[in-house]
Image (cartoon, helix red, strand yellow):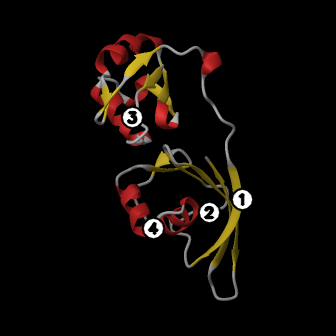
Amino acid sequence: MRITGNFLFDPATYSDFEQAIATAGLEEGDYGDVILLGERGAQVILIPEKVPTLQEGLKQVRTVPVTVASCPWSELAVAPPQVKSFSTVEASLRLDAVASAGFGVSRSKMSEWISQGLVRVNWQIVQQPRHLLKVNDLVAIRGRGRLLVQEIQKTKKDRYRIQMERRR
C-alpha cells in the first residue's frame, strides 16, 4: 500500500507512520515493513485482509492529510541497504554504550529506547541497558537499522575495541 501526502514542510518519521497505522485499527502483526518515501509519504507491506481497514481508517499522519492506495510489487521502493563498517573504543560492552556509538545517538537516548522496548538483540527485545554484548550479536532498532558486532578486542588500557557493521 502507498500512503501519500505532502510532507515537504513536515517530514514524517517511521514512528509517525506506525502510530497512524495503529490509529487506523491495525496491529503490529497485520503489517510488515514501512518504507519511507521522504516528502512523498511511505509504503507499507500489508496482509491482504487488512487492506480495507487501512484504506478506510487512515486519513492523516500527524497533521498531514493522506491518501491510501494499492501499490504493485513492481513499484515497491526498496533501496539496497547502506552498509558501513567501523570500529569504536568503549569502556564496556554494555548495550547502551555500544549501540549509542553504533547508531550515533547519545547514551541517555539509547538507554531510553532500550527501556521502552524499542531495541532488540538477536531479535529478542532487551529492556536492560546493562545487557552485555558479544561477538555476532545483532542489535536492531525498527526504522533505524541493524548493528552487527563483528569483533571485540581488549586494549592496553582495559577498554574494548569493537568492530561493527551497520546496515540501514
Q: Residues within 10 Å of mark 3 (few under 14, many from 20)?
A: many
Q: CA distance from mark 2 to mark 4?
A: 21 Å
Quarter of the image for residue 14 reads: top left
Q: Which residue is mark 1?
A: 85
Query: Which residue is at 45% across, 67% downward?
Result: 106
Q: Secondary structure at mark 3?
A: helix
Work out whether residue 132 or residue 83 is closer to the camera in this orientation and state it.
83
Specify which label sits upstream in the sequence, 4 or 3.
3
- Name which residue lies at 48% across and 63% down: 105
Q: Which residue is mark 2?
A: 134
Using the rendered view, name the quadrant where residue 59 is placed.
top left
Circles 4 and 1: CB atoms closer than 8 Å: no
Quick check: 138 left or right of 106? right
* Amino acid of disc 4: Ser
Residue 106, numbered circle: 4
Looking at the image, the residue that sits furthest to the bottom is: 157
Looking at the image, tell me whether mark 2 or mark 4 is earlier in sequence order. 4
Q: CA distance from mark 4 to mark 3?
A: 24 Å
Q: Position of residue 69 (x, y in %)?
A: 45, 15
Q: Amino acid at mark 1?
A: Ser
Q: CA distance from mark 3 to mark 1?
A: 29 Å
Residue 71 vertical placement versus 142 (above, below): above
Q: CA distance from mark 4 to mark 1?
A: 20 Å
Q: Mark 3 or mark 2: which comes first in sequence?
A: 3
Disc 3 and disc 2: Cα gap in Å?
Answer: 33 Å
| Mark 2 surroundings: few (<14), some (14-19) or many (≥20) residues within 10 A | some
* Residue 143 x %, y %: 49, 43
